[in-house]
Image (tube, grey):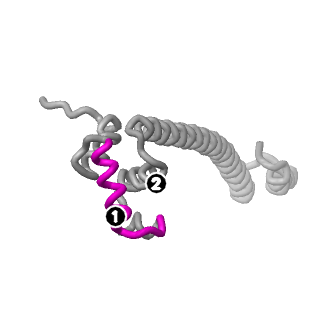
Amino acid sequence: MPPKFLFLLAVFPAYQIWDIWQLHGAVGVNYHLLAETAATVVFLWILTVVWRERRRTARELAELKTSRLAGERAAQERDATARQSTRDFLKQMQVQFEAWRLTPAEKEVALLLVKGLSLEAIAGLRESGAKTVRQHAANIYAKAKLEGRHQLAAYFLEDLMAPVTVD
């Protein structure tokens, strides 16, 4: 409903119409009376249009708020699922590292290799020599019976990829 004070604005033109009617009666065409009546009708029509538009806008705003909240909930659920998937993936990697009987240093190097870091970058992160990291990498490949970093990464990432379908 529109604010009541807006309808009060229609009282003055309505009073003008009543006053003119009282002064001149219903005799003949009174253009002043017609103008006042038309102005009052137009004002009330504009007021109604504004009122409807405000209601429509309020409904749309409420729908947007509801939609935003639903989107935020979906994003939170998606993020929680992604975090859980990451934890599960890392846990499976650790299980496989145990099966290969990797040392703690080799596990760390293997994880960084799967992430795609270079041997030099891994040496910098671990604050160790590049030759040491190379030796850890060679030990990892030998224990896993893999030929290199690409096969190591593929070993863990292959199952995450969607299967290729040939039409």
Magenta: main secondary structure: helix
Instruction: Name the residue located 70 percent from the left edge and 47 percent from the top edge.
Output: 51
In this rendering, position of residue 93 left or right of residue 24: left
Counting from the top left corner in percent of width and height, residue 87 is at 52, 40
Q: Quadrant of the C terminus?
A: top left
- Judge by depth and name the residue closer to the eye, 145 or 53: 145
Badge 1 amino acid: Leu
Q: Are marks 1 and 2 in contact (CB under 8 Å)?
A: no
When asked about the image quadrant of residue 157, the answer is top left
- Judge by depth and name the residue closer to the eye, 18 or 43: 43
Residues in magenta? 126-143
Counting from the top left corner in percent of width and height, residue 119 is at 34, 64
Numbered disc 1: secondary structure: helix
Mark 1 / mark 2, whichever is N-terminal: 2
How busy is the neighbourhood of tag 2: few (under 14 within 10 Å), some, or many (20 plus)? few
**Residue at the disc numbered 1:** 119
**Nearer the camera: disc 1 or disc 2:** 2
Residue 129 shown in magenta: yes
Q: Quadrant of the N terminus?
A: top right
How busy is the neighbourhood of tag 1: few (under 14 within 10 Å), some, or many (20 plus)? many
Up the image or down, 5 lies above or below 119; here it is above
- Judge by depth and name the residue closer to the eye, 121 or 100: 100
- Residue 166's tag is none
Badge 2 amino acid: Ala
Counting from the top left corner in percent of width and height, residue 62 is at 66, 42
Q: CA gap, disc 1 to disc 2?
A: 14 Å
Residue 107 shown in magenta: no
Up the image or down, 108 lies above or below 90; here it is below
**Residue at the disc numbered 2:** 105
Instruction: Name the residue located 47 percent from the left edge and 66 percent from the top edge.
Output: 125
Counting from the top left corner in percent of width and height, residue 88 is at 49, 36
Quick check: can you spot residue 52?
A: no
